[in-house]
Image (cartoon, rainbow, N blue to C red):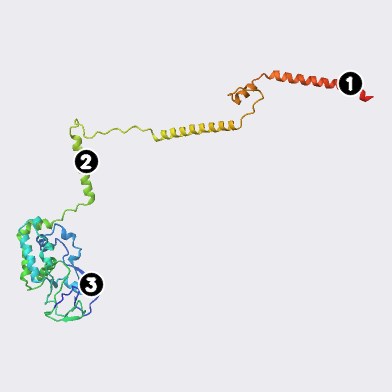
Amino acid sequence: MEVPHAEQCISFFYQFGCETEATELVHSATSLFCVVGHQVLSGMEHGELHRRLHEPFNFLNVQPAFARAMDLPSIAFRPQDQVIKAILQLYRYNISRPLDERVRLDQSPVVHIPLKCTVEVNKTWYDDPLYTMHPHAGTTTAHTYPYAGLPHFAPRADVGLLSITADLFLVAGDGLEDPLVTELNKLRESHQVLPSVQLFDRPPPPAPTVHSQLLQGDRITSRQKRKQTGEDSSHPTKRTHRAAPSQPPKRLSRLATSSKASDVACSSKNRFQDLLNDADPTPVSKRKREVGTPARDSQEKRVKLPLPLLSTRTVHMRSSKMKGMDKTKAILRPTRMR
């Protein structure tokens, strides 16, 4: 059973290098008429191919020398007739329908057909042997001119873009014919697709970004607000807004709180001082005080007594005692002298 080879399993040299080179199938989305026509007939969106030129479906990973030969193009991978006929059927279906009713190639039955490409070589340019490597066994096989025994290949690129490179290979070669590939090119350059081709030939509009969408939403919102404010304002709104209760400023509330705290501190300090006074009362005079009268009142009464009376009586008593003592000394003194 034949095993399809990978695209990097063919070379001009016997030794296969581990490194491959990526070559583009289509270099521009609008440089060739056939490329633009393929976008229209394969169901692509305007500008889609331009955005996807650097994706893997537009590249072939081949041996370095083989990549340079494909750029000429003197070598091409041509899909089998079954795939080309399915692409022709899709082209004929989409050519008479609007752009929004077309069927995409990557969503059609074409993608479910196993790809088996043949390697087309411009035999007027090459007559040296080509070498292929078995993908499983790793054995190398030499193929001489006219390369009749070359195996089939299964590239990972897009089948529609591979058909375009096959058509470009026919155009570059002298006397090369391929009726199915030529039919594909006729449909791409048909006058029926000319209006859509003119649209796709122009640069696509810029894709909307998140910033532009936000700006558009803000404009719509502001427009709606202006429309609401421009209406009759005599009708009351459904919801009435109630005024929030007035609250004192935070600074005043803090001052009030601090003043309350100072009052409490002062009152507690006075109470504590009263407790100390009760625990250590002032000595009470020997005078009998009335019941229920605090010691502080009696002390005040004692202080308020007439001080001259007390001081006069005390001085008089001391002077009389001193006179008596002097008389006694005068009587006894002469007696002791004798």
**Is 55 located above or below residue 304 in the figure?**
below
N-terminal of the pair, mark 3 or mark 2, is 3
Mark 3: give few (<14), some (14-19) or many (20+) Cα within 10 Å.
some
The Cα–Cα distance between marks 3 and 2, rounded to whole angstroms, is 57 Å
Q: Nearer the viewer, mark 3 or mark 1?
A: 1
**Is 266 located above or below residue 112 in the figure?**
above
- Seen at 17% across and 60% down, the residue is 50
- Residue 139: x, y in percent? 20, 80
- Residue 4: x, y in percent? 15, 74
Instruction: State the image quarter where residue 12 is shown.
Output: bottom left
The reply to whether dot 1 and dot 2 touch (C-beta < 8 Å) is no
Element marked by disc 1: helix
The Cα–Cα distance between marks 1 and 2, rounded to whole angstroms, is 131 Å
Q: Which residue is mark 2?
A: 222
Residue 331: image tag? 1
- Residue 27: x, y in percent? 17, 64
- Say how many tags the image has: 3
Q: Nearer the viewer, mark 3 or mark 2?
A: 2
Amino acid bearing label 1:
Ile
Mark 2: give few (<14), some (14-19) or many (20+) Cα within 10 Å.
few
Element marked by disc 3: loop
Name, please, the residue furthest toward the front: 291
Q: Which residue is mark 3?
A: 20
Amino acid bearing label 3:
Thr
Mark 1: give few (<14), some (14-19) or many (20+) Cα within 10 Å.
few
Question: Which of 28 and 78 lies nearest the eye of the viewer?
Answer: 78
